Image (cartoon, grey):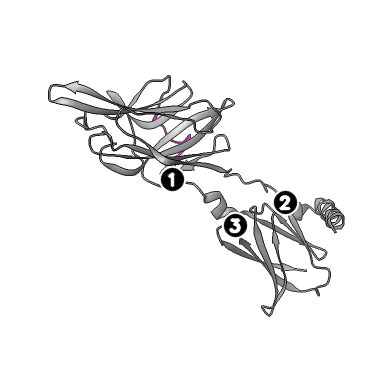
Amino acid sequence: MKKTTLKKSNNLTKRLAQYGALTAAIAGVADANGQIIYTDITPDEGGAGVQYLLDMDNDGTDDFSIRHFSASSFGGAVNNLFAAPNSSNGGILGIDSSFDYPFALDAGATISSGQTSWLPGNNYYKTMNYNSCNYFSSQWCGVTDKYLGLRFQIAGATHYGWARLDVNQDSGSGWLIKDYAYNSVAGESIEAGQTLSIAENAINEVKIVSLNKSIALYNLPENTDYKLYDITGKSVLNGSINDHTYVIEAKSLSNGIYIVELTDSFTKTATRKKIVL
């Protein structure tokens, strides 16, 4: 059966290539949004005197560092929290106001090349919270679930990501880094807090092409359930798919109008399309 299915799939691909309209319909099958690579830090890390080394792509090379330290002041000890890109190509979204102050981004904020407020790298520390928040430009004071907007490189190409933190009012022992993520496609944007959008939206990116009683499905999520309904709403075919490309053979069905329903097994998101066999 596997050999037969493969042969049919190959034959369908060859036939599709002969039809300009169908070829155009499946053009750009690759997901331009890329894949979000998400890492949950369990347990959360941080606290007084802690320096956290952030390796965005988990390749063994630290891309950023986040450091807390206490210092003496006229009024006693004060707390400070800093972040820094570890290379000249890295960057953090923020504002330059005598010192570099990273933004405390809200969930959903865009992190991309379109932003112009990238603070430079070179291991130069950016002031998240200085002198126990006695400087008005410090944005990381008594915040929960805020995001650093990050830019770093993989093999010489720029990628965008985020890190989520809680920071108490004076940036003392209560600061924590909780998780982080980046877009695996170089140059593509990411939203602060974005983790599963590719899985959530993948079902809407599927290309469906029917030809000669064969229904070709492209750009599928990793696990997809399908159902085929006739015009009366009766289910006539169904099954599960664990591949990104699949061909439903409908040779036994009569010519007519049908509805293909695809459901992402993970997110339960569904899409439907009318086809003619």
Q: Secondary structure at mark 2?
A: helix
Is residue 258 found left or right of 7 in the rendered image? left
Q: Which mark is residue 204?
A: 3
Q: In this figure, which residue is indicated by the disc labeled 2?
A: 24
Mark sitting earlier along the chain (3/1): 1
Vertical side of 271 occupied by 102: above or below: above
Question: Real-space Cα distance between discs 3 and 1?
Answer: 21 Å
Vertical side of 118 occupied by 250: above or below: below
Q: In this figure, which residue is indicated by the disc labeled 1?
A: 193
Q: Are marks 3 and 1 in contact (CB under 8 Å)?
A: no
Is residue 275 found left or right of 95 in the rendered image? right
Range shown magenta: 111-118
Identify residue type, mark 3: Asn
Mark sitting earlier along the chain (3/2): 2
Q: Is residue 113 magenta?
A: yes
Residue 126's spot in the image, x, y percent? 34, 26
Q: Secondary structure at mark 1?
A: loop
Question: Real-space Cα distance between discs 2 and 1?
Answer: 34 Å
How crowded is the residue under tag 1: few (<14 C-alpha within 10 Å), some, or many (20+)?
Answer: many
Is residue 110 found left or right of 98 in the rendered image? right
Of labels 3 and 1, the one closer to you: 1
Residue 7's spot in the image, x, y percent? 86, 54
Which of these two is toward me, 92 or 237? 237
- For the N terminus, the quadrant is bottom right
Q: How many badges with numbers are in the image? A: 3
Identified at 73% across, 59% down, the residue is 209
